[in-house]
Amino acid sequence: SQYCNTLDDEEKKELRVFSQQRKRENLGRGVVRLFPLTMTGAICQQCGRQICGGDIAVFASRAGQSGCWHPQCFRCHTCSELLVDLIYFFQEGNIYCGRHHAERLKPRCQACDEIILADECTEAEGRYWHMKHFCCFECEASLGGQRYIMRESRPYCCACYESLYAEYCDTCGEHIGTESRIKKLL
């Protein structure tokens, strides 16, 4: 919650519940140890190659008995980054960094890059925004329930889009093709 400075009381409560659930059900820390010489080799969960007796391996208790990785393979399933301090979130057979595990459970706001904890959010063009953050990229006017145009994954009110990007007809001076790009968010 140190990063979420603008949460209302309901969102703070949701963050506590969300964090507690993730810790209880998914959070773990990998343990590095030698794979026992006496055991038959295991298969690395990431690369599929064998881990032999005497090799160093990372074990993740939430992944069960077969959950082991080469140290260089202990990476987030989504971004492939090494997991810092071997801290992982386990879900559906895969390990994730905290950021990408959270995104599997809740949407992330396109504007502020925070997880959306509120009950309501705006979805447009397959992306999500906090209600207060779905606004014109240029003038910051709220676009909830308004007509808007997307350009390069950024929403614009019609007036800003037309002043910035619309082409004009040389004959009549009207905007060309803007109507077909306008969308209305209900």
Image (cartoon, helix red, strand yellow):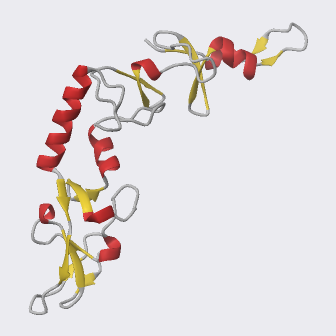
Q: Position of residue 49 (x, y in %)?
A: 29, 80
Quadrant of the rendered image containing residue 149: top right
Q: Which residue is drawn at the image coordinates 56% and 32% (left, top)?
A: 153
- The residue under the point 13% across, 48% down is 25
Left or right? Give the position of 45 relative to 25.
right
Q: Residue at x 26, y 25 (%)?
A: 11
Q: Is residue 121 visible?
A: yes
Foreground pick, 9 / 109: 9
Residue 6, image x, y percentages: 36, 25
Quadrant, the N terminus? top left
Identify which residue is drawn at 46% across, 9% down.
Answer: 145
Q: Is residue 176 above or below residue 35?
A: above
Q: From what the image shows, is residue 23 above or below residue 41?
A: above
Residue 47: tell me if it is visible. Answer: no
94 or 111, which is in the foreground?
111
How many numbered tags mark residues here?
Answer: 0
Location of residue 105 by image quarter: top left
Foreground pick, 66 / 170: 66
